[in-house]
């Protein structure tokens, strides 16, 4: 067994603190990774606070993991000691259902095995990337292109793929008007990626405080949702809206910003379900959709796309003992635009 240092939350109401546990020795198909960086996703906060129900404690969060391969099992084909790798939101799935066969493991019929707050097929709880090692089957490991620094690449493993996948699925590109609601971790990646795909990008943020950042990230337009004029002026404008907000909004107001046949894709996971009026959809034949992270194949495609276009996350690096304070700063919208934990601060 591999002694592992981590930070964990003992319960939904206690802060994270030091925690030790053991990972399995790498099996024939496993890769053992020395974790160097782990991004902080808003989903970490939702799950630590048990906002979605069913949380498993103690919880070691973290699903935006980058590091270097330390050891490989005897049958591992694609990775060698020293390779730069990443792990995202899941570490296993059934491998047999239609979704798994099509490389859409996140929609596995029997449910993917989450990187944390989940259970391996044998029932062992999974622990995430706020830890110094992880052992993962090579099929669920990603290769980080040389051009991407490991710290700025970490948030791509969730925020990057969660926005890349719907942008690809709904054909963001030249001639398409894309709006992004919320300029946070997911939102800032959505802006960069949609811009790189050639779409005309609009940010819908609570205020104009981040306007200069929006332009720097690649947005063509920036509007404050606190200004009622925004909803009048932009009525019927967008082909695609990505909603990255983690709290309940009036979706009807935003659906009205879609042009005919436009789609709003829900990415944020508020705890309460907003009411949607039929008129918001039937007028203009609009669609309301959702999207969950992305499969392994598409995550690799996204990493290669980001390397090609020189895109990575805008990060603020912290030590592990600052993680509770970082959560508070995320909740007040102070992060620009992703906290990344330097895992070396855990010690060896
Ligand atoms: P984040 O960094 O905290 O960003 C959320 C953004 O939402 C904020 O920066 C803010 O942008 C906006 N916002 C916050 N409070 C708001 C309010 N009261 N009213 C309106 N806008 C508000 O979070 P994140 O890591 O990007 O995650 C966002 C959500 O996506 C979370 O619910 C997370 O669980 C979910 N998520 C889903 C998936 C998936 O697969 N679908 C994957 C990862 C995360 P402005 O300041 O610009 O308004
Ligand atoms: Zn996430
Ligand atoms: Zn499956």
Image (cartoon, grey):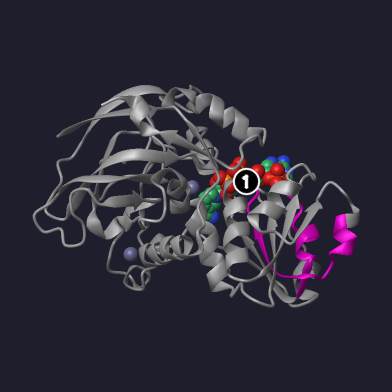
**Which quadrant is the N terminus positioned in?**
top left
Q: Is residue 247 visible?
A: no
Residue situated in front as seen by the camera: 51 or 134? 134
Measuring from the top left, give residue 47's x and y in whole percent: 49, 38
Q: Is residue 330 above or below residue 305?
A: above
Residue situated in front as seen by the camera: 249 or 65? 65
Measuring from the top left, give residue 311's x and y in whole percent: 52, 57
Q: Residue furthest left?
A: 74
Measuring from the top left, give residue 262's x and y in whole percent: 71, 73
**Which quadrant is the C terminus positioned in?**
top left
Q: Which residues are the magenta region?
A: 230-259
Q: Is residue 128 above or below residue 78?
A: above
SS of the residue at dot 1?
Answer: loop
Task: Name which residue lies at 34% across and 38% down.
Answer: 36
Task: Name which residue lies at 75% across and 54% down.
Answer: 204
| Ligand 1 neighbours mark 1 (CB distance < 8 Å) | yes
Q: Residues within 10 Å of mark 1 (few under 14, many from 20)?
A: many
Measuring from the top left, give residue 325's x and y in whole percent: 55, 24
Residue situated in front as seen by the camera: 89 or 110? 89
């Amino acid at each position: 067994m591999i002694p592992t240092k981590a930070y964990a939350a003992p319960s939904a109401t206690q802060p994270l603190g030091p925690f030790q546990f053991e990972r399995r020795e790498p099996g024939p198909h496993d890769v053992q990774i020395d974790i160097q960086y782990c991004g902080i996703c808003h989903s970490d906060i939702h799950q630590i606070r048990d906002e979605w129900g069913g949380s498993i404690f103690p919880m070691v969060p973290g699903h935006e993991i980058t590091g270097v391969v330390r050891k490989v099992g005897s049958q591992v084909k694609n990775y060698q000691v020293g390779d730069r790798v990443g792990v995202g939101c899941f570490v296993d799935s059934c491998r047999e259902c239609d979704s798994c066969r099509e490389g859409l493991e996140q929609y596995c019929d029997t449910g993917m095995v989450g990187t944390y707050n989940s259970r391996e097929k044998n029932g062992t709880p999974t622990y995430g990337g706020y830890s110094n090692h992880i052992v993962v089957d090579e099929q669920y490991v990603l290769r980080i292109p040389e051009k991407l620094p490991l710290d700025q690449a970490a948030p791509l493993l969730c925020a990057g793929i969660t926005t890349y996948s719907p942008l690809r699925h709904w054909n963001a590109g030249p001639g398409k008007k894309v709006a992004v609601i919320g300029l946070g971790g997911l939102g800032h990646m959505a802006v960069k990626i949609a811009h790189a795909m050639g779409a005309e990008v609009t940010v819908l943020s609570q205020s104009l405080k981040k306007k200069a950042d929006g332009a720097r990230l690649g947005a063509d337009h920036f509007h404050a949702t606190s200004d009622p004029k925004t909803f009048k002026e932009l009525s019927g404008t967008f082909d695609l809206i990505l909603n990255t907000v983690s709290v309940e909004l009036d979706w009807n107001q935003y659906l009205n910003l879609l042009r005919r046949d436009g789609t709003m894709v829900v990415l944020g996971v508020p705890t309460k379900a907003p009411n949607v009026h039929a008129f918001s959809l039937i007028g203009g034949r609009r669609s309301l959709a959702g999207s969950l992270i992305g499969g392994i194949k598409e995550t690799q495609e996204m990493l290669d796309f980001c390397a090609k276009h020189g895109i990575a996350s805008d990060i603020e690096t912290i030590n592990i003992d600052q993680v509770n304070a970082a959560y508070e700063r995320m909740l007040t919208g102070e992060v620009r635009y992703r906290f990344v934990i330097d895992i070396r601060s855990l010690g060896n």
